[in-house]
Amino acid sequence: MVECAVGRGDMTVAFLQELLPGKRNGIARDVLQWVDRGAESLLETLARTAFRQAGILVEPQVYIEGVGYVDLLLDGWLVVELDGRHHGDWAQVKKVHRGNNRSVVQGYTVLRYYYADVIHRPDEMVAEVLSVLAGRPSGGLPPRPAAF
């Protein structure tokens, strides 16, 4: 709710911090550090926060030429798309898959997660992302399999 209100311009993080003085409000003030105006859904907010708490550089709603906006871009090369129920329409599914393909052609890696992943298995989701991030040399292309 806070992120929505800040994103709409109804209030600022600084205003909320002023309303939370004293020791007993420390936890609430700490939560405010995770507020970001970039997310378009609660699912994105929760995933972004989980990734950032794991020390991952996360950019929400990044525009990629030929693809459009992606939900999250991690470490500048790993696209994370978060799917809710709106992706059930076949035309939408095809559009999403074509966007994934264009992302990969441009050198990005794409992972997709669903509501259940973000809400019920966030630790598994973060572990999988960390594993993918660890497999790519910093600033380089993804490792290629050896030729047979």
Image: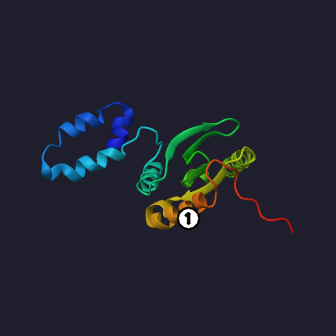
The residue singled out by tag 1 in the image is 128
Tell me residue 103's x, y (percent). 69, 46
Task: Please report the residue visible at 56 percent of the width from the left and 54 percent of the height from the top.
Answer: 83
Tell me residue 65's x, y (percent). 68, 35
Q: Nearer the viewer, residue 61 or 77?
A: 77
Q: Is residue 51 visible?
A: yes
Task: Please report the residue visible at 63 percent of the width from the left and 47 percent of the height from the top.
Answer: 139
Q: Amino acid at mark 1?
A: Glu
Tell me residue 74's x, y (percent). 55, 49
Q: How is the image coloured?
A: rainbow
Q: Is residue 1 visible?
A: no
Task: Please report the residue visible at 46 percent of the width from the left and 42 percent of the height from the top.
Answer: 39
In-image side of 47 versus 10 (left or right): right
Judge the density around disc 1: few (<14), some (14-19), many (≥20) Cα neighbours within 10 Å: few
| SS under mark 1 | helix
In-image side of 12 versus 82 (left or right): left
Question: 97 above or below 6?
Answer: below
Tell me residue 51's x, y (percent). 46, 55
Q: Quadrant of the N terminus?
A: top left
